[in-house]
Amino acid sequence: MSEKNREGKRTARERMAIEREKQKAAEKRRRALIVGVSVVCVLGLAAVIGVIAANAGKDDDGDSAGPVVAPSGAQGEDSLVIPVGKADAPSTLVVWEDFRCPACKSFEDAYRSTIHELTDAGQLRVDYRLATIIDGNMGGTGSQNAANAAACAQDAGKFVEYHDVLYTNQPAETDDAFAENSKLLELAAKVDGLDTPAFRTCVEEGTHNAWVAKSNDAFRSGGFTGTPTVLLDGKNIYQDQSMTPQKLKQQVQEAAKG
């Protein structure tokens, strides 16, 4: 083989080697680019997820965020009780209720006049405690908004009257009509002296929303199974199938006699 041919083959091998090195370098750059883009995508996705999670947290807080403002005259632990009747009444009825709850309306319709009679006579004190479980089960904010409006009525010294109006005019469970402030204000007009600028501001600004949320937290942590939960001197009378308004009246009057 001539020297010229050997030189040609060597040059060809060198060109091939150089080309292979170029290809290896290009492949490394391609892989590095893919990895870099993947990292950027992952970081970008994480950032998006973080923003979504942060916003979701804000949405969950909803209108219940803000300072806890208890209504006037609220009592008990964390001021979560709205009391009705004389403080020294011989018997105490604790009523956990939700203004969207159909069973609560049924209880109110059956026992309302008896409870009023006993509280007016000074024989019974009623501790009303508010929950929002229907909002949680059905969606919406009617339970919360109605409870806030009732707390606003308490500020005005009109809790009992407005409480009764809300139950008398309760919408169907699936109808979140109480979520509309206009509906709550419309019903307030049925209570003499309640529809004032102060009441309207309290309703529209959700002054007691955080208090309502705290009351609902107390209900959930109390181990109760649903609303209404009605306790006469600590005994759950709503679970007593034999209980009637007349039997409740008899028990309270006997306790008043000592």
Image (tube, grey):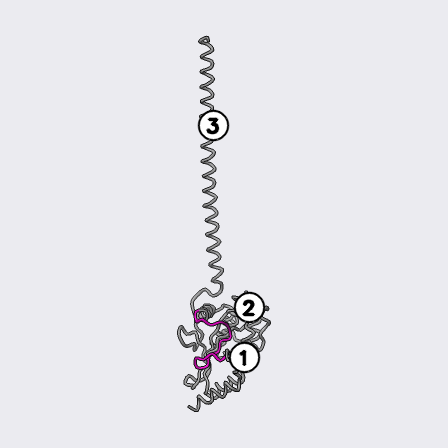
For label 1, the residue is: 108
Q: Secondary structure at mark 2?
A: helix
**Residue that appears at 48% across and 61% down:** 60
Q: Nearer the viewer, mark 2 or mark 1?
A: 1
On whether residue 154 falls in the magenta region, the answer is no
For label 3, the residue is: 23
In the rendered view, tell whether residue 84 sits above or below residue 16. below
Calculate the distance from the C-alpha at mark 3 to the C-alpha at mark 1: 84 Å
Q: Position of residue 249 (x, y in %)?
A: 50, 87
On whether residue 235 falls in the magenta region, the answer is yes
The amino acid type found where label 3 is placed reads Gln
Residue 217's image quarter?
bottom left
Magenta residue span? 221-237
Residue 32's image quarter?
top left
In the rendered view, tell whether residue 32 sits above or below residue 125. above
In the rendered view, tell whether residue 36 sits above or below residue 83. above
Task: Pick whichever of labels 3 and 2 is earlier in the sequence.
Answer: 3
Q: Position of residue 169 (x, y in %)?
A: 58, 76
For label 2, the residue is: 179
Near-viewer residue (4 or 139): 4
Quadrant that contains the C terminus: bottom left
- In the displayed image of the protein, which residue is found farthest to the bottom? 257
Q: Secondary structure at mark 3?
A: helix
